[in-house]
Amino acid sequence: MRTFLFTTAGVGLLLLVAYDVYATVLHASARYGPIGERLDRLVWRTARSVAFRLSRIRRHKLLNAVGPVLLPLLLATYVFSLIMGFALVYYPHVPELFIYSQKHEGSAFMDAVYFSGISLTTAGYGDIVPRTSPMRALAVAESATGVALISLTITYLLSVYGALEKKRAVALSFYHQAGEGADAAGYIAHHFVEGRFYGLRDALRTATRDMQGLLESHVEHPVIHYFHPAEVYKSLPRMLFLLLESCAIIHTSLDRDEYAELRNYPEVRTLEANTRHVLSELVASLDLERRARPRDEERPADEKRWARRYRSNLRRLAEAGIKVRGDGAAGLAEYRERRKEWESKLQRLSNHLGYDWDEITGDTDPEYAADEEKEEPGATTLDEERPVGEPSRR
């Protein structure tokens, strides 16, 4: 009975690790294995609860250190779990089915853990060796498991950092086109030269493809969620905002007659639909909808903020020589409805990933979104249960 219980427990732990490695490393899914998912979320929430009690710069530095720690921490968890799983299988047979080079004096369980450890890591000191064929086969299987785990981990690390490099390259492209901040109107004006738009369709098409690639990276490697760039412009919420806001501007702020063709570009519709899909998938994968408090649909502060942003967009476009919409009230109403469609989801994502709403959008202070070193006037404390849409207290 004792042998059955320990063997069952050990095999169960080994199967759990095997499933987690399959779900996290081998299988492309937005939801990964139970060990990796719980570990990542626990570490992230702990670091995040501390970070939002710090200044802006220190907060980003702390959260920036979390992602690189998660990967070796997950590997260490796998190694520890495998060692303990095999040790539980060995334990009922120690010391009877093993040969010791010296007189046996220690705990049988610690001997099982020790033998499991040197077998998994292929150290093989030879001071404890299995006596029977089943134990020898199990030791060989454990050594092969250790080699396979290390190989898979190296491959996983390379793919994760390759995806992160691609993400930084895409963010840098948006950063320069948007005036080194959250200026979506500037992103559009960047392609307006001598009274005409040049390359805007290609830019929108490229942006759609880039966002599809970034979504697949986050689906295949969910740990990327927790690689927090200290530079806000490299963050996924900033990129999503720039694209969604650009689509809103094209539909609501440009002169309807002068730029009717631009407003009807299929690239605009495709980019908007694709970006909203990416946002929804990320929010769903992080389970942010279920854990968020319901918010009031009508908020005077939001109405004022949207009106201020709309007027700012019109002014920015006019300064670039772009004809803007004349019926301001109708344009603002349409702009307001478009912001409502995606803003709450983006706020949840931004807050969860450790960013203030203003530093993502610059709705209140454009300089705060453009200046990475600018400190907020006062410290801010946020948590998962803060109502979505509530601005930071500054």
Image (cartoon, helix red, strand yellow):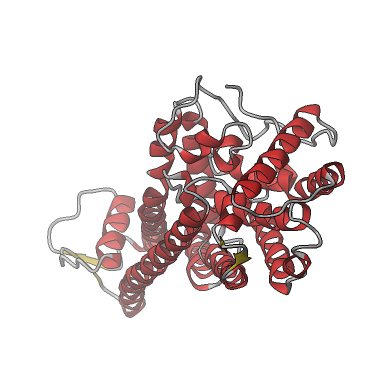
Quadrant hosting residue 246: bottom right
- Residue at the limit of the structure toward the front, as seen here: 194
- Which one is in front, 353 or 11? 353
Report the front residue among 254 and 277.
254
In this picture, is 383 found above or below 233? above
Residue 258 located left or right of residue 319: right
**Percent from the top left, x then y, of residue 274?**
68, 66
- Which residue is painted at 43% across and 31% down in the image? 374
Q: Residue furthest left?
A: 102
Residue for point 59% across, 35% down: 358
**Count of number-bearing discs:** 0
Q: Is residue 388 above or below residue 133?
A: above
Can you name the residue that lies furthest to the top here?
A: 378
State the quadrant of the C terminus: top right
Could you tell me which residue is drawn at 43 percent across and 40 percent down? Answer: 63
The residue lying at 42 percent from left, 62 percent from top is 169
x, y percent for residue 287:
67, 50
Is residue 95 something that shows in the picture?
no
Give the image quarter of residue 355.
Answer: top right
Residue 181 position within the rendered picture, expressed as x and y whole percent measured from the top left: 51, 45
Can residue 262 be seen in this snapshot? yes
Residue 56 lies left or right of residue 381; in this view the side is left
Q: Is residue 173 above or below residue 346?
A: below
Front position in the image: 369 or 278: 369
Coordinates of residue 77 in the picture (x, y in percent)? 40, 53
